[in-house]
Amino acid sequence: MQTEIWTASDEDLKKAGQTLKNGGLVAFPTETVYGLGADALNEKAVKAVYAAKGRPSDNPMIVHIHSVSQIGDLTPSVSEAMKILAADFWPGALTMVVPKAPCIPDATTGGLDSVGLRLPSSEAARRLFAFAGCPIAAPSANLSGSPSPTTWQRVRDDLFGRIDGIVMGEPCEIGIESTVVDLTGEIPTILRPGYITRQELENSLAKIGKTVEIDEHIKDMQDLVKISDRKFAEKGELGLANSYANKANQNTESSGIIELIDDTASSDFKPKAPGMKYKHYAPKADLILILGDYYEVAEKMKKMQTELEATGKKVKKILLSDSEEDIKLEMNTFFEKLREFDEKGADVILARGHSQENGRAYAIMNRMLKAAGYKVLS
Ligand code: TXA
Ligand code: MG
């Protein structure tokens, strides 16, 4: 298939919009990550998205709109919560899961009776959707299993020859995907943490006396104490730091670090946002998250790097602090670094994990934990 490369000029976006309207697949920039769009009401087009990405077809897609006036067509009744969140966070990095209108085919929602709606702030995206004249179903524009793309060049790397076109926009401002909040139940529940935090949603929904929960499975998978405990229990050792030192002393072929960091990802992980269960963002290299004070982690990384390199492993490091600035930088660069390190043939990536107290750190840790397969060294 020939893949057109379009600019974000009106002339080009018109062509791209027409392609969408005709059932084609077009990748486009948003403020979070690049999306791979299709007419959300065209079953055949939506199925082609799954094929292009190589993605399991039970995974529901987010339906993107360019104007709040479209929501009446996509959900049977607009709740107070939805109105308030739309007013406070749209356009922006928030996806609201609401009951779906019958016009949306099952293929778009993976057979669910709810639909995720998002009005992105990216101006190029909204102009594109307006030219297309239809709601746009779009997952992130990566091949299934690789990190979400934050530049058009990364979309090209993954999807050139598999889709009709790519709109060349700016690198994404945020760099991780939108917050997904489920509004179909009594209590609004975060199904995927993102740039917009629980606290921000709560501040907004306080106007109608509502609180916000985080999906239990996400909580469980991000409980770092538990993740570490689980490892201690399995290993029957005093602590990871000790066992790391012991293994290193045994002077085994790979210094024991890789064996030590066994796979603790639990197989009973069944979050409500179906997309959360797939192994996303997994780099080819072994990613090890190290928790702790910045300087201590820096020291430890240096030591581990020396040992790993002595066994012939290629090591890359990601070392940022918990400052607001660094958290934003981590969000903005993490996916890109995974891709870059894979290109460079890294065997091991050592990354400092973040304290999750600040809500945005919670979101980036969600992606880091998944990329690490929940392998954590404390
Ligand atoms: O920032 C974003 O959200 C990007 C850009 C392109 O908008 N899109 C994105 O799409 O990340 P995707 O397909 O990679 O992730 C969509 C997430 C998945 O976790 C999916 O399970 C969840 O949203 N989701 C979508 N519709 C849902 C629904 N009706 N019920 C529950 N979860 C839903
Ligand atoms: Mg994705």
Image: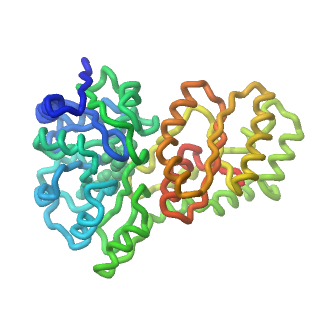
**Percent from the top left, x then y, of residue 243?**
82, 50
- Ligand 2 appears in which quadrant? top left
Residue furthest to the bottom in view is: 209
Q: Does the rendering let one see residue 196?
A: yes
Residue placed most toward the observer, 301 or 124: 124
**Percent from the top left, x then y, of residue 369?**
56, 50
Residue at 45% x, 49% y is 277
Residue placed most toward the observer, 120 or 117: 120
Question: Which quadrant holds the N terminus?
Answer: top left
Residue placed most toward the observer, 147 or 29: 29
In the visual, does 273 lie left or right of 261? left
In this rendering, the answer to whether 190 lies above or below 5 is: below
In this rendering, the answer to whether 91 lies above or below 210 is: above
Q: Does the rendering let one see residue 59?
A: no
Residue at 23% x, 25% y is 164
Residue furthest to the top in view is: 2
In this rendering, the answer to whether 19 lies above or below 161 is: below
Q: How is the image coloured?
A: rainbow
In this rendering, the answer to whether 317 lies above or below 208 is: above
**Percent from the top left, x then y, of residue 126?**
20, 45
Residue at 53% x, 30% y is 340
Please count the marks in the image: 0
In the visual, does 370 lie left or right of 260? left
Question: Which quadrant holds the C terminus?
Answer: bottom right
In the visual, does 369 lie left or right of 245? left
**Percent from the top left, x then y, of residue 144?**
41, 35
**Quadrant position of residue 346:** top right
Residue at 79% x, 57% y is 239
In the visual, does 59 lie left or right of 237? left
